[in-house]
Amino acid sequence: MSNEKVYEEFCSLVLKKSSELAQEVTDIQTKKYPEMQSISNDLLTMREELVNLFAKSFVLGHDERKKNFKAWGKKAGTQCATLNASLEEMLNEFPEYRTILGDLLKSHAKKHNMTIDEFYNMLNILETDIGEVTCYFSLPFVDYQADQLRNSKEALFELSVPVIPISDEIAVLPLVGDIDTSRAKLMLEKALEKSAQLKVNYFILDLSGVPIIDTYVAQIIFQLIDSLELIGVEAKVTGMTPDIVQTVVNLGIDFQKIQTYSSLKQAVNTIKGNNTQRTV
């Protein structure tokens, strides 16, 4: 029998046994990792698709095989990531395909009295495919997890600039910790957005939890106050620590035009006192 016929016969054999082989991998993995039981049905379908691809590899050229495995890897890697499967556990199953299909291949080689070189050529196809599918599976899996981590960081980052309405007229932005360039920009953006949304008359920027500010942050504060004035909101700054005051003086930053108060309470009382005087 020609090598081509031998390859076609092995392809047909694996295709016929694809469900059985996929179930065998599933049983092995579930035994090793019981936590995978809840997603075993989803993984079984994915595994059967992969076994079919391994089978067809023996009758396809390398470029077409590579294209098929890349498509499967992108789909399966993303799917497994959304199922919260462990990348380590998923990668540990690829050697199982090597063992199971390798045993079938060995029996097939004996049946056809294949030479060592002929057997090696078929085994090399399987080895190459397993290496490539491992890579193609890992990339979208890692990309998905990176996206999730990035989204979580962005959500957490937004929580670092909480604009809080304390009355119908007053909103407060209490800052805690260091303010870098990104956070300063977000502070400007959120302060304007929330002030317009809440339709407040006063905005208080509380710096009592900020250890230090630099020239750039000071410029953002000035820009914020000017921008708030343009939309009809009066801005006040509270809680400037001695270290911040010293830095401001050393940098030659002029805060005289900004309404500053030692505490948030003092600023709120001043606003309420002014409003009371206006109503009398």
Image (tube, rainbow, N blue to C red):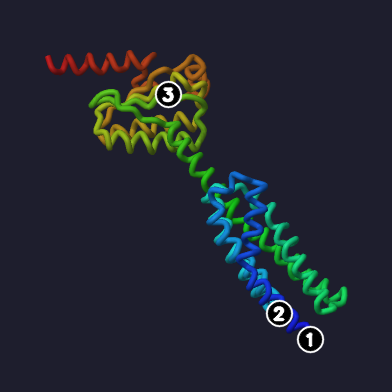
Residue furthest out toward the right: 116
- Callout 1 amino acid: Met
Mark 2 and mark 3: Cα distance apart in space = 85 Å
Q: Earlier in the sequence, mark 2 or mark 3?
A: 2
Q: Where is mark 2, residue-wise?
A: 9
- The residue drawn where x is 36% and y is 34% is 191
In three-dimensional space, the C-alpha distance between marks 1 and 3, rounded to whole angstroms, equals 92 Å
Q: Residue type at mark 2: give it.
A: Glu
Name the spot of residue 83 as percent of width and height, x first.
53, 50
**Labels 2 & 1 near each other (Cβ < 8 A):** yes
Q: What residue type is labelled 3?
A: Asp
Q: Do we see residue 62 in this rendering?
A: no
What's the residue at 68%, 74% (across, down)?
A: 13
Q: In this picture, is 192 found above or below 273?
A: below
Q: In which quarter of the image is residue 203?
A: top left
Q: Decide if residue 47 is in sight here.
A: yes
Answer left or right for 249 relative to 203: right
Query: Residue 2 in the image: x percent, y percent?
Result: 78, 86
State which quarter of the image contains the N terminus. bottom right
Name the foreground residue: 44 vs 254: 44
| Residue carrying label 1 | 1
Mark number, residue 101:
none
User: In front of the other: label 1 or label 3?
Assistant: 1
Q: Residue at the location (76% across, 70% down)?
A: 105
Closer to the camera in the image, 270 or 222? 270
